[in-house]
């Protein structure tokens, strides 16, 4: 079943214009909620950023640094979960925040760890 207009608007607030509505609806059919669709897409984007070189330079020609994109995507995950850098227990209202696997996930990708 395709996502409704309201569901698409909710997802777009988190993920922007990409991917297209059909792809989002396919994910919604498979996952069952807007929250899960958004979570999966943000996690995929973050994984793609991490698995690519964070920065590179072609001397005198081009320079690229995606480390701020990684931090921004991680911050989106914190916001989606309703947590902050202080930890899960300082949480707001993220869906599923009581799930112990989410607490483990947040610990595993905490960008503030060791800073």
Image: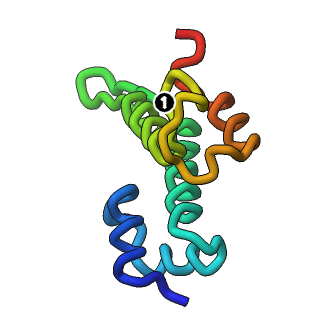
Q: Residue furthest bottom?
A: 1
Q: How many marks?
A: 1
Q: Which residue is depicted at the point 32% across and 65% down?
A: 17
Local packing at callout 1 (Cα closer than 10 Å; few below 14, some 14-19, many 20+) is: some
Q: Residue furthest right?
A: 100
| Residue 38 locus on image (x, y percent) | 50, 60
| Residue 26 locus on image (x, y percent) | 56, 79
The answer to which of 53 and 6 lies nearer the viewer is: 6
Image quadrant where residue 18 sits? bottom left
Q: Which residue is depicted at the point 68% across and 42% down?
A: 102
Above or below 19: residue 105: above
The answer to which of 57 and 82 lies nearer the viewer is: 82
Q: Which residue is depicted at the point 53% across and 62% down?
A: 35
Q: Residue furthest top?
A: 115
Above or below 99: residue 4: below
Which quadrant of the figure contains the N terminus?
A: bottom right
Image quadrant where residue 12 sits? bottom left
Q: Which residue is under mark 1?
A: 84
Above or below 24: residue 95: above
Describe the colour scheme in one phrase.
Answer: rainbow
The answer to which of 72 and 80 lies nearer the viewer is: 80
In the image, 64: left or right of 110?
Answer: left
Above or below 29: residue 54: above
Secondary structure under the numbered disc 1 in the rendered image: loop
| Residue 61 locus on image (x, y percent) | 25, 29
| Residue 28 locus on image (x, y percent) | 56, 75
């Amino acid at each position: 079943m395709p996502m409704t207009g309201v569901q698409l608007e909710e997802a777009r607030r988190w993920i922007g214009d990409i991917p297209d509505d059909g792809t989002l609806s396919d994910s919604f059919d498979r996952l069952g909620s807007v929250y899960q669709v958004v979570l999966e897409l943000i996690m995929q984007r973050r994984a793609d950023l991490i698995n690519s070189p964070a920065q590179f330079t072609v001397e005198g020609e081009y320079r690229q640094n995606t480390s701020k994109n990684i931090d921004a995507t991680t911050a989106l995950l914190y916001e989606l979960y309703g947590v902050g850098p202080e930890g899960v227990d300082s949480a707001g209202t993220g869906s599923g925040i009581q799930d112990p696997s989410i607490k483990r996930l947040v610990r595993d990708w905490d960008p503030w760890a060791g800073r």
